[in-house]
């Protein structure tokens, strides 16, 4: 950021009064312009024993599979954003069942709020950000073709919650990067 969005004056980097870190500050109007993490919302959408996956039509990770998710827009709640993303990416109408994961992705300045959701009906279709969408069985998840680590994490979390009507306790980032895809899904003897 080089210029103040409010007055158009050049910005400078400095520590504002009552702060402890460097920020963009406009010397003309004294407005502090904060750069904060982006909020991503999404959902693991299921219908019976199948879940919805979207093949990305856009970068990053074009051609790989993900859940319906994207940036929260101004003027909407996180729940509205999750429902909007399901519609935009998969033309899916969903009923949110509960927040199941909150991930902090420091290297790209994101906070991800991910829900468990139920598809209202089986009619889905690719939106403008998806090449295709599919309802797949849990055993048919293309683990080696998933777009992002958080998709692996949240699918594992959702698998743990299969058959659980909630309420849910959201989980955070795993303590260490697991070998994603290995040993999934848990066998029916392990509770699924």
Image (cartoon, helix red, strand yellow):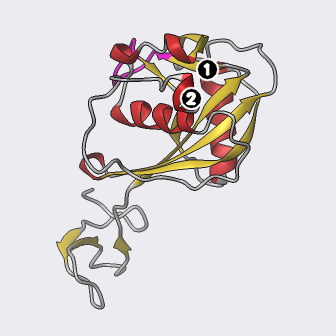
In the rendered image, the vertical position of residue 77 relative to residue 126, given as above or below: below
Label 1: how many Cα within 10 Å (few below 14, some 14–19, many 20+) = many
In the rendered image, the vertical position of residue 90 relative to residue 68, given as above or below: above
Residue at the (54%, 32%) spot, across then down: 159
In this view, which residue lies farthest toward the right?
A: 121
Looking at the rendered structure, the secondary structure element under dot 1 is strand
Relative to 170, is 19 on the left or the right?
left
In the rendered image, the vertical position of residue 141 relative to residue 175, given as above or below: above
In the rendered image, the vertical position of residue 33 relative to residue 3, given as above or below: below
> Between disc 2 and disc 1, whose residue precedes?
1
Disc 2 versus disc 1: nearer the observer? 1
Label 2: how many Cα within 10 Å (few below 14, some 14–19, many 20+) = many
The foreground one among 162 and 88 is 162
In the image, which disc is placed on residue 68?
2
**Quadrant in which the N terminus appears:** bottom left
Query: On the image, numbered disc 1 is attached to which residue?
Result: 52
Mark 2 → mark 1, Cα distance in angstroms: 8 Å
Relative to 109, is 151 on the left or the right?
right
Q: Position of residue 89 (x, y in %)?
A: 60, 23
Q: Position of residue 101 (x, y in %)?
A: 51, 48
* Majority secondary structure of magenta residues: loop
Q: Quadrant of residue 62?
A: top left
In this view, which residue lies farthest toward the bottom?
A: 18
Cβ atoms at labels 2 and 1 below 8 Å apart: yes
């Amino acid at each position: 950021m080089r210029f103040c969005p409010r007055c158009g004056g050049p910005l400078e980097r400095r520590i504002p009064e009552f702060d402890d870190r460097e920020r963009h500050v406009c010397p003309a109007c004294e407005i502090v312009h904060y750069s904060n993490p982006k909020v991503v919302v999404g959902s693991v959408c299921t219908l019976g024993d199948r879940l919805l996956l979207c093949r990305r039509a856009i970068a990053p990770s074009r051609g790989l599979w993900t859940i319906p998710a994207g940036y929260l827009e101004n003027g909407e709640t996180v729940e509205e954003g999750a429902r909007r993303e399901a519609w935009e990416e998969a033309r899916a109408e969903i009923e949110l069942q509960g927040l199941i994961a909150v991930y902090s992705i420091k290297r790209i300045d994101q906070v991800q709020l991910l829900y468990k959701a139920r598809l209202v009906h089986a009619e889905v279709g690719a939106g403008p950000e998806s090449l295709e969408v599919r309802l797949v069985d849990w055993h048919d998840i293309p683990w080696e073709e998933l777009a992002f680590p958080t998709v692996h994490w949240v699918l594992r979390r959702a698998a743990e919650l299969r058959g659980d009507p909630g309420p849910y306790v959201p989980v955070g980032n795993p303590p260490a990067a697991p070998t994603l895809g290995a040993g999934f899904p848990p066998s029916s003897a392990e509770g699924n």
